[in-house]
């Protein structure tokens, strides 16, 4: 298996080089925790002893080399992306907590790097509607 030898960030992407002289690149939208991290936090990574994963201890984030083999591109043309773009004051962490899912999963739905089931989409939309009703009743 190839081993990661170098990691760097540029133009909204994470890139890696391997010992087989290959280079892989993925948009940061695929890794929401890294997308939201500062440059200093992103720079504080460790390549594991096998060379097949990267760890950011400060962020509690791990990415396996296999994540770079996926070529799915973000699809921001989805209902969740449009809602969170229209209402930037929505707190992704708190919405995810209310629903009972991890913040990074909700972010992947928003960025369009992962597609939620219709049931999950309905659950997210109903949570947002409930928040709106609660606000309207103040």
Image (cartoon, rainbow, N blue to C red):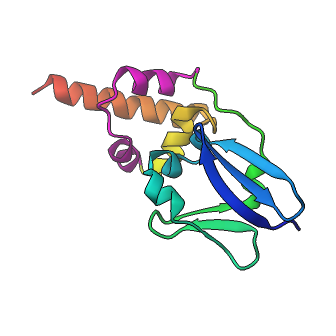
Task: Report the span colored magenta.
Answer: 77-99
Q: Where, by quadrant of the figure, is residue 27 drawn?
A: top right
Location of residue 7 in the rendering, given as x and y in whole percent from the top left corner: 67, 58
* Residue sitting at x 72%, y 55%: 16
* Residue sitting at x 52%, y 60%: 43
Q: Quadrant of the N terminus?
A: bottom right
Q: Where, by quadrant of the figure, is residue 89 drawn?
A: top left
Residue 89 covered by magenta stretch: yes
Q: In the image shown, does 23 or 62 lie closer to the viewer? A: 23
Above or below, 113 against 94 in this view is: above
Location of residue 107 in the rendering, given as x and y in whole percent from the top left corner: 50, 41
* Residue sitting at x 13%, y 25%: 137
Q: In the image shown, does 17 or 33 lie closer to the viewer? A: 17
Q: Quadrant of the C terminus?
A: top left
Above or below, 126 against 30 in this view is: above
Q: Among all residues in the image, which is located at the extreme bottom? A: 49
* Residue sitting at x 56%, y 22%: 78
Residue 96 covered by magenta stretch: yes
Location of residue 122 in the rendering, given as x and y in whole percent from the top left corner: 49, 30
Location of residue 76 in the rendering, given as x and y in whole percent from the top left corner: 57, 25
Number of numbered tags placed on the structure image: 0
Q: Among all residues in the image, which is located at the extreme left? A: 138
Mostly what secondary structure, the magenta segment?
helix
Above or below, 6 against 25 in this view is: below
């Amino acid at each position: 298996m190839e081993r990661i030898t170098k990691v760097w960030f540029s133009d909204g992407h994470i890139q890696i080089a391997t010992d087989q002289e290959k280079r892989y690149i993925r948009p940061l939208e695929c890794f929401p925790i890294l997308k939201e991290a500062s440059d200093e936090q992103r720079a504080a990574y460790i390549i594991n002893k096998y060379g097949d994963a990267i760890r950011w201890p400060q962020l509690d984030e791990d990415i396996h080399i296999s994540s770079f083999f996926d070529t799915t591109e973000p699809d921001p043309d989805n209902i969740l992306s449009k809602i969170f773009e229209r209402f930037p004051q929505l707190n992704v962490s708190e919405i995810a907590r209310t629903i009972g899912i991890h913040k990074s999963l909700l972010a992947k739905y928003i960025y369009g790097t992962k597609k939620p089931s219709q049931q999950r989409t309905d659950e997210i939309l109903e949570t947002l509607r409930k928040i709106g009703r609660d606000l309207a009743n103040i």
